[in-house]
Image (cartoon, rainbow, N blue to C red):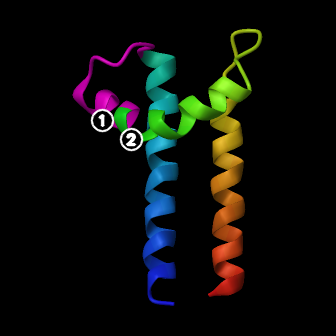
Amino acid sequence: MAILPLLEIVLYAFLVCLLIRSVFSWIEPYPRNRLHLIMFQITEPVLRPIRRVIPPFGGFDVSFIVVWVGVLLLLGVIRQVG
């Protein structure tokens, strides 16, 4: 049970990384900034498989929303178990 609080912290940190990446995507679509590059490297391994299943349509990347909702659901499950 001691691992659940750690997993919760990691998931919240991942949500912050997703949020930072989304803000950077509006400002600078290609990662050149060091912080943007780090956020890209952290989040892309999770977003890429989702993007293969659900491709962007109309210029809108749905993978971000799918991952965001999935992480929130996982956090809800962790809170119920813990």
Mark identifier at residue 70: none
39 drawn magenta: yes
Query: Which residue is the site of mark 1?
Result: 38
Would you place residue 79 above or below residue 73 in this image?
below
* 9 relative to 55 in the view: left or right: left
Query: Which residue is the site of mark 2?
Result: 42
Query: In which quarter of the view is residue 34 placed?
Result: top left
Which residue sits at x=63%, y=76%? 78
Separation of marks 2 and 1 at Cα, in angstroms: 6 Å
Q: Nearer the viewer, residue 51 or 22?
A: 51
* 46 relative to 74 in the view: left or right: left
Q: Which residues are magenta?
A: 28-40
How many residues crowd mark 1 within 10 Å: few (<14), some (14–19), many (20+)?
A: some
Q: Amino acid at mark 1?
A: Ile
Q: How many marks?
A: 2
* 49 relative to 38 in the view: left or right: right
Which residue sits at x=66%, y=22%? 61
Q: Residue furthest left?
A: 34
**x and y percentages locating residue 39 in the rendered image:** 37, 36
Label 1's element?
A: helix
Q: Residue furthest top?
A: 58
Would you place residue 45 above or below residue 24 in this image?
below
Label 2's element?
A: helix
Quick check: marks 2 and 1 in contact, CB under 8 Å?
Answer: yes
Which residue sits at x=67%, y=58%? 72
**x and y percentages locating residue 65 in the rendered image:** 69, 38
**x and y percentages locating residue 68 in the rendered image:** 64, 46
**x and y percentages locating residue 11 in the rendered image:** 51, 60
Would you place residue 51 above or below residue 80 in this image?
above
29 drawn magenta: yes
Q: Amino acid at mark 2?
A: Ile
